[in-house]
Image (spheres, rainbow, N blue to C red):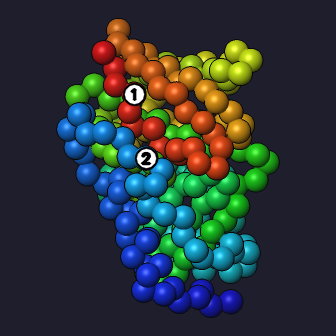
Amino acid sequence: MNPRVLTAALTLVVGATISGCSTATPASTPSPSPAASASQPGGRESGQSDVEPLLAEYGLEGMDAVQIVDHLDQVGGAERPADLVASVRPGSLLLGSGAQQHSLPIEDDRFYLSVAPYVDQTHECFHHSLTTCTGELQGEEVHVTIVDMADGRVLVDDTRTTFANGFVGFWLPRDVDARVEVHHGGKQGHARIRTDADGPTCLTTVQLT
């Protein structure tokens, strides 16, 4: 099936999604509210057969949304397909290239949170872009704990190495109010997040001090 052609307005939304997470800014820059971030696209949700030509073009054939997220978030440098829009939303993955746009569901009540802790500089981000976002600490070992504030349940307690893009990603349950704490090189930082429909999939406000 041939991909549908987007309207001009929808193309502008896709462009905003890319540019919203591509440039480092001073650490004093405030984090945007959900309303200030790229708006939810109006494209239809795609079936697997609809999106297959696009997946094949970028070497993603046979992957579902979860596998694509895990793969693309770990690709760095020149290997990143910068002309591919890959925006993680609560419950879905937006994929687009040129006039194509597809929305793949993220099922099993999973919520993806990609965290880019920083010391000196960060950038504004709300919906994580798998192909344009870049954090300060790349290939660095960090210890991350994520705790459900409602019942104290520990969702994550792990030492990870940040990806080539400076992020480290976690699959969390949906509809959780959680505290994220990061330790690195004797420094630490924390933030509060929610994994609901209005929650961020990109966390760039954890400054390590």
Q: Is residue 90 left or right of residue 110?
A: left
**Residue 7 in sight in this render:** yes
The residue mark sitting in front, 1 or 2, is: 2
Front residue of this view, candidates 85 and 11: 11
Front residue of this view, candidates 78 and 200: 200
Which residue lies at the image location 60% right of the left edge and 36% below the top edge?
Answer: 194
Q: Going by the picture, which residue comes out furthest to the left?
A: 26
Structural crowding at the residue carrying mark 1, measured as other residues with C-alpha within 10 Å and reported as few (<14), some (14–19) or many (≥20): many
Residue 91 is marked as: none
Which residue lies at the image location 31% right of the left edge and 39% below the top edge?
Answer: 30
**Which comes sooner in the sequence, label 1 or label 2?**
2
Residue 60 sits above or below residue 184 on the image = below
Q: Amino acid at mark 1?
A: Val
Q: Quadrant of residue 206?
A: top left
Where is residue 103 shown, x and y percent of the image?
63, 68
Q: Going by the picture, which residue comes out furthest to the right?
A: 108
Front residue of this view, candidates 178 and 185: 178
Q: Amino acid at mark 2?
A: Ser
Which residue lies at the image location 26% right of the left edge and 51% below the top edge?
Answer: 23
Residue 45 sits above or below residue 170 on the image = below
Where is residue 202 shown, x and y percent of the image?
47, 44
Structural crowding at the residue carrying mark 2, measured as other residues with C-alpha within 10 Å and reported as few (<14), some (14–19) or many (≥20): few
SS of the residue under disc 2: loop
SS of the residue under disc 1: loop
For the N terminus, the quadrant is bottom right
Q: Quadrant of residue 50?
A: bottom right
| Residue linked to disc 1 | 206
Where is residue 125 shown, x and y percent of the image?
39, 47
Q: Is residue 36 left or right of residue 199?
A: left
Q: Is residue 129 left or right of residue 103?
A: left
| Residue linked to disc 2 | 33
